[in-house]
Image (tube, rainbow, N blue to C red):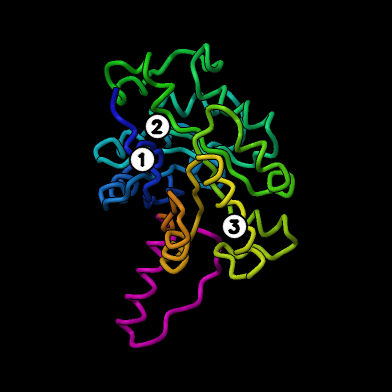
């Protein structure tokens, strides 16, 4: 079976940089994947993407060495299984609040006896190649998002879930859970301390630690802290920021300020 290079890097405690895909377009997905990111994630939760879009986007990503991930819309086994069957090599599961929810996510990612994933990798086995049936349990990444007050309070029990590969921090929802305004890249000192605390817990549990950013500044900051996988913005942000910067340069003016949404 094709190696999950991103997961292998995380298991060696190495660092990777990825990109977020929110636009329902196979060509933009292909272009971003060809840029050289270690992994790219198709966002079914907040992105403008449905299942049919995701399939064509995963196919486009497969023309590159980038590891294809999907953030599923919710911790629903059928959503997780469908994404994996379509060729995702890992899922990011939002709003995981406790051990039971983490176990549900892991179980949906693993074939028996390690889980209850139903067998039918209609495209996943084509992308993964020979050996998918017997090796998928070790190659598919299951990543839980910690971003709620309950998730933070129960972080240790979530992180001790057998079969979980990593934690992905959603900075904006984490901020809301702390009574702070959601700003995408969160500048508040207390937010940073919470992020550092979750990072330390990940390291103690031997899990990959990931976090979302929408700017180079925050990507560099979190890599310097020791995160294993950091999102360097997404297709929408890269397109809008670069277009605004070059338009302003052409006009000889300052670029417009843009509402930070994390994308």
The residue at the point 43 percent across, 49 percent down is 228
Q: Could you say whether the residue bearing mark 1 is in a helix, strand or loop?
A: helix
Q: Position of residue 58 (x, y in %)?
A: 36, 35
Q: Height in image: 4 above or below 49?
A: above
Badge 3 or badge 1: first in the primary sequence? 1
Q: Are there few (<14), some (14-19), or many (20+) residues within 10 Å of tag 3?
A: some
* Image marks 2 and 3: residues in contact by CB distance under 8 Å: no
The residue at the point 31 percent across, 24 percent down is 128
Badge 1 or badge 2: first in the primary sequence? 1
Residue assigned mark 3 = 195
Residue assigned mark 1 = 6
Q: Height in image: 249 above or below 187?
A: below
Q: Which residues are magenta?
A: 235-263
**In this picture, residue 199 sits left or right of residue 56:** right
Residue 62 lies in quadrant: top left
Q: Position of residue 179 (x, y in %)?
A: 75, 62
């Amino acid at each position: 079976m094709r190696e999950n290079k991103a997961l292998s890097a995380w298991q060696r405690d190495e660092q990777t940089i990825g990109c977020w895909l929110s636009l329902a377009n196979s060509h933009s997905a292909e272009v971003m994947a060809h840029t050289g990111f270690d992994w790219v994630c198709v966002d079914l939760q907040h992105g403008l993407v449905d299942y049919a879009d995701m399939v064509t986007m995963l196919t486009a990503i497969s023309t590159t060495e980038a590891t294809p991930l999907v953030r599923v819309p919710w911790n629903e086994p059928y959503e997780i299984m469908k994404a994996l069957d379509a060729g995702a090599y890992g899922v990011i599961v939002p709003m995981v609040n406790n051990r039971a929810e983490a176990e549900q996510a892991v179980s949906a990612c693993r074939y028996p006896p390690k889980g209850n994933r139903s067998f039918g990798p209609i495209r996943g086995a084509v992308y993964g190649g020979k050996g998918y049936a017997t090796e998928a349990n070790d190659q598919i990444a299951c990543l839980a998002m910690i971003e709620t007050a309950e998730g933070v309070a129960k972080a240790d029990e979530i992180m001790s879930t057998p079969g979980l590969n990593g934690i992905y921090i959603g900075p904006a929802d984490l901020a809301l859970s702390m009574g702070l305004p959601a700003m995408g890249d969160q500048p508040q000192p207390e937010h940073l301390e919470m992020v550092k605390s979750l990072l330390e817990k990940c390291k103690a549990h031997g899990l990959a630690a990931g976090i979302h950013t929408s700017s180079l500044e925050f990507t560099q900051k979190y890599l310097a802290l020791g995160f294993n996988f950091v999102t360097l913005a997404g297709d929408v942000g890269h397109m809008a920021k670069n277009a605004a910067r070059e338009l302003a340069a052409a006009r000889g003016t300052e670029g417009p300020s843009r509402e930070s949404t994390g994308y």
